[in-house]
Image (cartoon, rainbow, N blue to C red):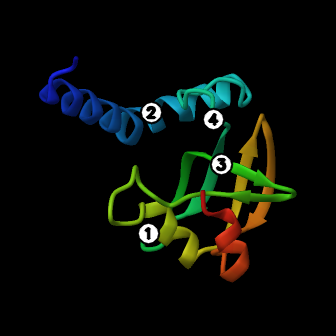
Amino acid sequence: MRALGTTRATRGAATWFFLTLSPRVDRVLLRVSRGRVNTALGLPVLLLTHRGAKTGAIRETPLAYFADGAAILLIASQGGMPTHPAWYFNLRANPDVEVTIRGRRRGMRAREAQGEERERAHV
């Protein structure tokens, strides 16, 4: 039996790790390993290169993704928080991005899934 406080502390530590530390570590791991090693516990991770909505600065964000044919699906959940992550707003303002998957880089244009496509993507 686990104590409630232990469960919350563990969940809080895991959330902190995946939202704060993991992206910093994954930026390096993904580059060095050519996309073969990450901290996402078995999920595929890409490196998203995008432009900041306000600053125009180039940003690199490691993200877990799902493939749907040639399409790449990203979920802007910020660990289940009620607000979208910064990269979501960056992509809305500047949809031309580059993704690096397993060491291969390609240009793409981001867009938000709508209608039937969005329903099909819901997990």
Residue 94 locus on image (x, y percent): 60, 74
C-alpha separation, residue under disc 3 versus residue under disc 4: 8 Å
Q: Which residue in the rendered view is the most extreme toward the top?
A: 1
Left or right: 84 as drawn, with respect to 76: left
Q: Which of marks 3 and 2 is nearer the N terminus?
A: 2
Judge depth for marks 3 and 2 and give the one in front: 3
Residue 58 locus on image (x, y percent): 55, 58
Q: Earlier in the sequence, mark 3 or mark 1?
A: 1
Q: Mark 3 points at which residue?
A: 65
Residue 81 locus on image (x, y percent): 33, 57
Q: Which residue in the rendered view is the most extreme toward the right?
A: 69
* Marks 4 and 2 close (CB-CB < 8 Å): no
In front of the other: 20 or 120: 120
C-alpha separation, residue under disc 3 versus residue under disc 1: 26 Å
Q: Name the residue under label 1.
A: 55
Q: Which of marks 4 and 1 is nearer the N terminus?
A: 4
Mark 1 nearby-residue class (10 Å; few <14, some 14–19, many ≥20): few
* Marks 1 and 2 close (CB-CB < 8 Å): no
Residue at 38%, 42% in the rendered image: 19
| Label 2 secondary element | helix
Above or below, 93 against 87 in this view is below
| Label 4 secondary element | loop
C-alpha separation, residue under disc 1 versus residue under disc 2: 24 Å
Q: Mark 4 points at which residue?
A: 43
Left or right: 18 as drawn, with respect to 50: left
